[in-house]
Amino acid sequence: MSLTQLNKLEIAILKAVMKSKGRVSSYLLFKRMKLTLSDLMSTLFSLQSKAFVTITDDWVEITDEGKKNLITHRFPDSKNLNQIPSSMLRSNKLQIGEPYIPSRRRLDSKLLEKQKM
């Protein structure tokens, strides 16, 4: 599946059609998007030429290719968000069972005062 470059307006129209259960009247889309008619129609025809929507009579319907492309724009890559960047990792790691002594200057002095009380 190739990722086709879409502008923000095309993505917004695909989202609006998708929210309407995949099929919406062009007039209703015109009212919801609050665009000029020429901008809406030129964008719809652009999406139709890319085979992301089909226009029949007064209805705009999103195709399977349009759904796939919308999902890939929403989730462009599947990198793990829980992964720690390598620039933040220490070069020398502690072994299991090795003692760890924290730096005193990095400790919060207020925290140590509360423990003494």
Image (spheres, helix red, strand yellow):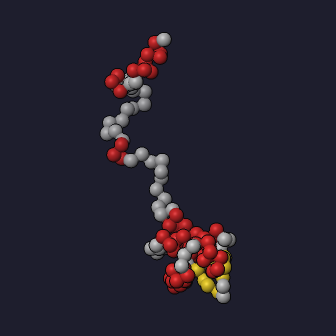
Regarding residue 81, the answer to whether it shows in the image is yes
Vertical relation: 19 (above or below) 109: below
Residue 61 in which image quadrant: bottom right
Report x, y in % for residue 38. 52, 83
Residue at the far bottom: name it: 57
Residue 101 vertical position relative to residue 25 in the rendered view, above or below: above
> Does residue 43 appear in this view?
no
Give me the residue at 58% from left, 69% from top: 15
Specify whether 17 is left or right of 11: right
Q: Residue at x 47, y 52 (%)?
A: 80
Task: Name the one closer to the observer, 66 or 38.
Answer: 38
**Residue 53 coordinates in the image, percent (x, y):** 58, 80
- Residue 21 figure quarter: bottom right
In the rendered view, does 104 fall on the left or right side of 44? left
Closer-to-camera residue (37/70)? 37
Residue 86 vertical position relative to residue 23 in the rendered view, above or below: above
Most distant residue in the top direction: 117
Image position, residue 97 (x, y; %): 43, 27
Q: In this view, does 90 lie above or below 81?
A: above
Q: Which residue: 43% across, 16% down?
A: 113
Residue at point 64%, 68% (across, down): 19
Q: How many labels does the image show?
A: 0
In the visual, does 48 lie left or right of 24? left
Residues 101 and 30: in front is 30
Q: Position of residue 82 (x, y in %)?
A: 48, 47
